[in-house]
Image (spheres, rainbow, N blue to C red):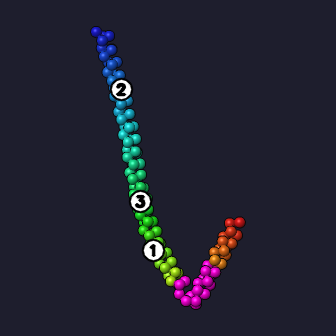
Amino acid sequence: MILCICVCSGHGSMDDMLDTENKRLAENLASKVSRLKSLAYDIDREAEDQNDYLDNMDSNFLSATGLLTGSVKRFSTMVRSGKDNRRLLCYVSGGLVLAFFLLYYLISRIHS
């Protein structure tokens, strides 16, 4: 009879040990799931922010396209008009080319 009691108490101890280990693993798993949930939420928020940024970029590009289209129309009208406007166009074009090369030279000197 004593032998039976020892075996039973040993078996109960093993169950307690396994139960404790299962609880520890369950808590560990719960903390990992909580971290994954937090990461998923952060990824979702970042994706929404990036989508908003891209939408704003799209509207900015559309407004820039409209501005450039209007500028090209005005430029074409100026080219088709009289001789005085052509002379002014040549001065403006030459000034822009000169300004471009001057900026290029200055920037290359700064980086050197």
**Mark 2: amino acid:** Leu
Instruction: Using the image, determine if residue 31 lies above or below residue 91.
Output: above
Is residue 42 rendered to the left or right of residue 85? left
**Badge number at residue 53:** none
**Residue at the spot of label 3:** 51
Q: How many marks?
A: 3
Magenta-drawn stretch contains 52:
no
- Residue positioned 56% across, 88% down in the render: 85
Q: In what element is the residue under mark 3?
A: helix
Q: Are marks 2 and 3 in contact (CB under 8 Å)?
A: no
Quadrant (top left, top right, bottom left, bottom right) of the C terminus: bottom right
**Residue at the spot of label 2:** 18
Q: Quadrant of residue 5?
A: top left
- Residue positioned 38% across, 33% down in the render: 25
Mark positioned earlier in the residue sequence (1 or 2): 2
**Residue at the spot of label 1:** 66
Closer to viewer: mark 2 or mark 3: 3
- Residue positioned 55% across, 83% down in the render: 79
Magenta residues, start to end? 78-96
How packed is label 2: few (under 14 Cα within 10 Å), some, or many (20 or more)? few
Closer to viewer: mark 1 or mark 3: 1
Could you tell me residue 33's position as x and y percent? Answer: 38, 42
How packed is label 1: few (under 14 Cα within 10 Å), some, or many (20 or more)? few
Q: In what element is the residue under mark 1?
A: helix
Is residue 74 rendered to the left or right of residue 105? left
Report how far apart the C-alphas of labels 2 and 3 lie in the structure: 49 Å
Q: Are marks 1 and 3 in contact (CB under 8 Å)?
A: no
Closer to us: 12 or 39:
39
Extreme residue toward the top, this view: 1
Mark positioned earlier in the residue sequence (2 or 3): 2
